[in-house]
Amino acid sequence: MYVGIDAGASATKVVIINEEETILSYTIVPSGVNFKASSENALKKVLEELKLAKKDIAYIVSTGYGRELVESNAVYSEITCISRGVHKLYPSVRTIIDIGGQDSKAIKVDENGRVLDFVMNDKCAAGTGRFLEVMASILGKPIEELSALHFKALNPVKISSTCTVFAESEVISYMSRGCKIEDVIAGLHNAIAERIFTMSSRIGFEKEIAFTGGVAKNLGFVEALSKKIGVKPLLPKEPQIMCAYGAAILAKQSFKKIKV
């Protein structure tokens, strides 16, 4: 058995695979402030589900924001892990957009899933899951409800700034003027889609395109992004674990190299 641990800034994801690189189990838990503890708890959870012990694991690869703080056999970058995981599911994909809690990335890969180029935003909350969390809090809505409300919008507002502070002021202004909450949410999604499009354009879009990360669960935003880039991206069944899945695949490959 092989394990991939993605110690993300917001959530820790653990995936366990077999020799065929089939996902046997996975879990997603809040990272909190202790990456080591959250990763250990997540790993314990998947092992218990499969009735396995830690000794049954041949190799562990860690990745993500807290990758150096997690107990593992090897460490890989998120860019490499995401690319490997997506390539396994969608060999035809050449561009990957990944939006997590604290950063967003656009990755260009070749026919073997190897990274050719990438661009990343990890300096500003705009264009990340954190931006949506802040806006949902201002609007008094759970972040899980944003997607459904997006599809009720008839007249999306124009959010001029993707800076969290200035966007917050715009949202409050729109709500005080009686704008419908769904129109504000759709406006926020459109603003983030614009930012992601601008960032991704720096490496160029090459079809097919896949969308991963926790924000990919927000189908309202997926629609906004699809309209902006002019194509509907491929969505994994569980987009939030693609990085951990890629790490697990790399764990298997790394172990095989050791055995040769």
Image (cartoon, rainbow, N blue to C red):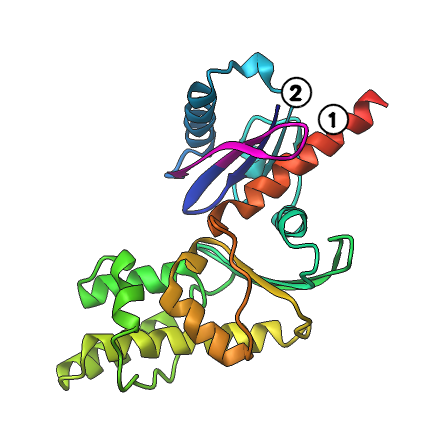
On screen, residue 21 above or below 48: below
Mark 1 surroundings within 10 Å by alpha-carbon count, few (fewer than 14), some (14 through 19), many (20 or more): some
Of the numbered discs 1 and 2, the one sitting upstream in the chain is 2
Disc 1 and disc 2 in contact, CB within 8 angstroms = yes
**Residue on which disc 1 sits:** 255
The answer to which of 229 and 162 lies nearer the viewer is 229
**Residue on which disc 2 sits:** 58
Is 32 contained in the magenta span?
no
How far across and how far down the image is residue 232, in percent? 52, 71
Q: Quadrant of the C terminus?
A: top right
How far across and how far down the image is residue 115, in percent? 73, 56
How far across and how far down the image is residue 143, in percent? 28, 58
Q: Secondary structure at mark 2?
A: loop
Asked if residue 166 can be seen in this view, the reply is no
Q: Residue at x 42, y 75 (%)?
A: 224
Alpha carbon separation for disc pair 1 and 2: 7 Å
Res. 235 mark: none
Q: Residue at x 54, y 66 (%)?
A: 233
Mark 2: amino acid? Ala
Mark 1: amino acid? Phe
On screen, residue 21 above or below 184: above
- Magenta span: predominant SS is strand
How far across and how far down the image is residue 17, in percent? 59, 31
User: Image quarter for residue 107?
Assistant: bottom right
The answer to which of 89 and 99 lies nearer the viewer is 89
Q: Which residues are magenta?
A: 14-30
From the viewer's perspective, is 208 left or right of 172? right
Q: Residue at x 55, y 80 (%)?
A: 230
From the viewer's perspective, is 84 left or right of 242? right
Q: Residue at x 41, y 78 (%)?
A: 191
Asked if residue 39 can be seen in this view, the reply is yes
